[in-house]
Amino acid sequence: MAQPSTARGRVAVIGAGPAGMATALSVHQAGHEVILLERYKQARPAGNILNLWPPPIKALALMGVDTDDLGSPCYTEFRSAAGKRRVRVDLPEEIIRDYGGGFIGLLRPDLYERLVDALPDGVLQVDRGVDSFEQDGDGVRLSMTDGSVEHVDVLVGADGIDSMVRRSLWGEKPKREHNLHIFGGFTFSENTGAQAGLCILSHSRTVQGAWTSIRSKGRSGFQWWVLEAHDASTEYSGNLYDDATKLAREFSSPLPELVAATDPNTVQRWPIRDRKPLKKWSSGRVTLVGDAAHPTSPYAAYGAGMATEDGYFLGRRLAGVDLTEQHAVEAALVAYETPRRPHTARQSQQAYFLGKMFHHSPAPLQILRDQILDRTPLLQKVVGESSPKEIIAQLNVIDTAEQSFRVATR
Ligand SMILES: Cc1cc2nc3c(=O)[nH]c(=O)nc-3n(C[C@H](O)[C@H](O)[C@H](O)COP(=O)(O)OP(=O)(O)OC[C@H]3O[C@@H](n4cnc5c(N)ncnc54)[C@H](O)[C@@H]3O)c2cc1C
């Protein structure tokens, strides 16, 4: 991608995760100079498994990322552990036509590779941690870990759940421990009986067991995860593969077979936590994107997706804005965050409550809960119908943003 000649400001983005890389791409397309500052020696994916809904895939393509065969599009269902269907996530025909299906299963390193490849030379600066920043009406001054200083017009905190930028703007608030942990892995074995093109999320009384098909570098495979309650104040000392195997036994085929076919050394575990939604993200010339703005539980399976969308929308909002003008910057940041806050808060709060309902219900209520989920359309209404609506709404918002962007960059 060539640097447009209309640059009207300098933007620093802290953190080369999905949010930071998307922001850098979109801001660059908007015609501004952008530096993406990552503390590690590379943009390194935290984890292996990932699914993306169509809106982030659409945003990635618009930002010049190669999305061809990036993942396996999957039709999604929620089921009981015994295999009874509780929810169908039905997307409209045209979305299935355009994206091959609903939920796209991929491996996280593949997304990082495609994002890094799309970044223009010199934008990503690795081994460049940021310690702190100060801002005034004229700009933002960054103090780097190596003692150097950067001056920019706008600062974007894409620095994840423990964001320094968020803390500096809005103070230290405690993490919300979900007291859950998740084990995940993937396999390219062809002998598991799993069917390509499906994403199946099942719940037993206390455990979630899920699998989805994936594509990775031209190969077809499957990823899986199992999730259960775990006291966050207790150190985990088990064996990842053995514990995942035990949890998967509660579920019908092919989940146990998928875990059995996985290389034990590739199984990973994450404690699940987030933070309550913020009332405001931006202050002056500084704003937040991704987990820095709205740390999201994997229960939503949308944290990286929303992070990508944030970056896309922020860049679009900064198109045509003179970043040396304090008021113009503030107005653009407000316009960026105003629709993003309620959308992202809905997803992360819903994820938090689903986690509570499935894994922290008192034992006597679990039977009643499962009867309701098996015999009434409650979950279909809460998840099966709301998800397609949100997806369609996001795709439409992207279309509108793109039209304005074309006008602003004409
Ligand atoms: C098990 C699991 C499964 C998940 N599954 C899904 C899924 O299926 N779909 C989905 O959409 N989401 C999923 N998520 C959520 C998703 O991973 C996160 O929401 C997403 O990674 C957030 O991206 P981000 O770019 O905001 O932050 P991060 O990915 O956390 O990136 C932050 C970056 O900032 C850098 N950084 C931090 N501080 C500094 C500093 N001071 N200076 C310089 N650099 C700094 C870090 O090194 C890092 O590279 C899952 C999460 C987990 C744990």
Image: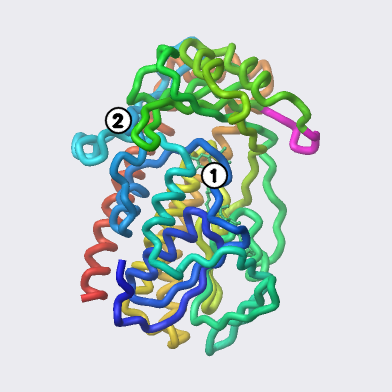
Q: Is residue 378 visible?
A: no
Q: Is residue 406 above or below residue 95?
A: below
Return the residue nearer the eye: 113 or 32: 113
Identify residue for label 2. 90
Main secondary structure type of the part rendered in magenta: loop
Q: Is residue 41 visible?
A: yes
**Amino acid type indicated by mark 1:** Gln
Q: Is residue 346 above or below residue 25?
A: above
Q: Residue at x 40, y 74 (%)?
A: 332
Magenta-colored span: 229-235
Disc 1 element: helix
Identify residue for label 1. 349
Q: How many marks?
A: 2
Q: Earlier in the sequence, mark 2 or mark 1?
A: 2
Cβ(mark 1) to ligand 1 < 8 Å? Answer: no
Crowding near the residue tagged with mark 2, few <14, some 14–19, many ≥20 C-alpha atoms within 10 Å: some
| Residue 112 percent across, percent down from the top left | 46, 50
Return the residue nearer the eye: 80 or 248: 248
Which label sits on residue 405? none
The scheme the figure's colours follow is rainbow
**Amino acid type indicated by mark 2:** Asp
